[in-house]
């Protein structure tokens, strides 16, 4: 393959022909079957996904946001209850809590990883706290035993937001199998993505699984018997069939993401750029994003762009600063680490279709970056 001058943040157009062919065949099979909602592909995907995650159940739903709302509601968490989560996440994490009827409470993050800080969460636990939604941000899992212990001691449920951490593993246990429930998104750009919206929740609890099956389908426990105010949140047959094909590539793609990360770890070296804390265990990070930090983030981003390298910011505005959240979130809580992180983080390309030469070119371009500020101060002799 010839080297591209532009390096994008996603690699769909460069995926192997065999994968595209298998996906077309899978769609053709669904069309021939004449069954488009809750058929065999959904059940088979649920079976295989629960196996990957090492849980007893997986329930396919329409997207990651619904997976969070349904997990909370299946635990009877709702109005009057508090749920603690991070301000440094996709807004959907927060929305899932709001949509369950519970009150979202934000705690601050650890400055070295961007992950929720356990100390800050502990400070926010009240008599109304029912759950913590722990986001495995960028694909990182850390300190899972400590999280579990802390939640158990304080009598709150641990729910994992695994939308960025498909098949990440800590102490040999996969993401989505630590908490009472795990919520997954299969949005196209996630490590395992459908060709549209899709999601799932995982659990070892038969009760949660059963309630989720009901909630995703109009709150219907038997045909035309509605015992809950449910959602229409079914995983499509076509998306499930596509996910079954793409699941066959998850391990290979994850290993490639780790190789790319290793090249970044080895080759990025610039006084003005910081890497996040290294993972505690080799499989505890699936590099949904490779994030670097710089006090000159915006300048660095322009520098990369000038060299044809696209980057993204996850996330430029923390949840509590979003217009829709400003009035329903306590603004007196100290969330300064999250604010600082939002102002300095940059996600550089990290997807399985990147070539080694491209990864090295990105690392070199990062290394060549000199902020204008420091050039000026040198030239004036300060
Ligand atoms: C993508 C994402 C979601 C939302 O998933 P959707 O399928 O888009 O609803 C939730 N949480 C996190 C951390 C995400 O990255």
Image (cartoon, helix red, strand yellow):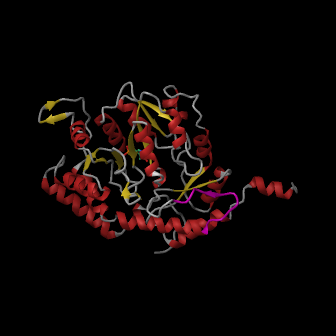
Q: Quadrant of residue 256?
A: bottom left
Going by the image, does 36 lie left or right of 328?
left
Counting from the top left corner in percent of width and height, residue 183 is at 35, 46
Q: Is residue 270 magenta?
A: yes
* Residue ID at (58%, 62%): 308
Counting from the top left corner in percent of width and height, residue 170 is at 42, 57
Is most of the magenta stretch helix, strand or loop? loop
Say how many tags the image has. Answer: 0
Is 186 in front, or is 303?
A: 186
Counting from the top left corner in percent of width and height, residue 140 is at 47, 54
| Residue 140 in sight in this render | yes
* Residue ID at (36%, 25%): 79
Q: Which residue extends farthest left?
A: 223
Q: Which residues are magenta?
A: 267-279
Q: Is residue 26 magenta?
A: no
| Residue 242 in sight in this render | no
Looking at the image, residue 252 lies above or below residue 186: below
């Amino acid at each position: 393959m010839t080297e591209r001058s532009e390096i994008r943040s996603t690699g769909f157009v460069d995926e192997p022909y065999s994968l595209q062919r298998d996906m077309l065949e899978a769609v053709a099979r669904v069309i021939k079957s004449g069954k488009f909602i809750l058929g065999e592909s959904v059940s088979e995907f649920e079976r295989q996904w629960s196996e990957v995650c090492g849980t007893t159940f997986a329930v396919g739903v329409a997207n990651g946001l619904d997976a969070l709302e349904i997990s909370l509601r299946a635990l009877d968490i709702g109005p009057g209850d508090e749920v603690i989560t991070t301000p440094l996440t996709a807004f959907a994490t927060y929305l899932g809590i709001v949509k369950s009827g519970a009150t979202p409470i934000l705690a601050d993050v650890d400055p070295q990883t961007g992950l929720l800080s356990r100390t800050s969460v502990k400070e926010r636990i009240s008599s109304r706290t029912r759950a913590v939604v722990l986001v495995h941000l960028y694909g990182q899992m850390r300190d899972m035993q400590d999280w579990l212990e802390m939640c158990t001691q304080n009598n709150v449920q641990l729910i994992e937001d695994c939308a960025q951490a498909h098949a990440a593993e800590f102490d040999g246990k996969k993401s989505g199998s630590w908490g009472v429930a795990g919520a997954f998104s299969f949005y196209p750009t996630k490590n395992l993505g459908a060709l549209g919206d899709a999601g799932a929740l995982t659990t070892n609890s038969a009760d949660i699984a059963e309630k989720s099956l009901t909630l995703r389908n109009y709150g219907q426990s038997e045909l035309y018997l509605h015992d809950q105010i449910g959602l229409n949140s079914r995983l499509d047959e076509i998306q499930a069939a596509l996910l079954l094909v793409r699941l066959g590539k998850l391990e290979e793609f994850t290993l490639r993401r780790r190789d790319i990360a290793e090249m970044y770890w080895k080759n990025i070296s610039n006084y003005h750029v910081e890497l996040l804390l290294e993972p505690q265990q080799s499989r505890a990070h699936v590099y949904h994003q490779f994030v670097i930090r710089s006090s000159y983030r915006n300048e660095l981003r322009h520098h990369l762009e000038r060299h044809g390298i696209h980057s993204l910011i996850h996330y430029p505005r923390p949840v509590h600063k979003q217009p829709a959240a400003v009035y329903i979130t306590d603004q007196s809580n100290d969330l300064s680490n999250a604010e600082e992180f939002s102002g300095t983080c940059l996600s550089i390309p990290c997807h399985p279709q990147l070539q080694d030469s491209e990864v090295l070119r990105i690392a070199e371009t990062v290394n060549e970056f000199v902020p204008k500020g420091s050039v000026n101060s040198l030239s004036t002799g300060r």
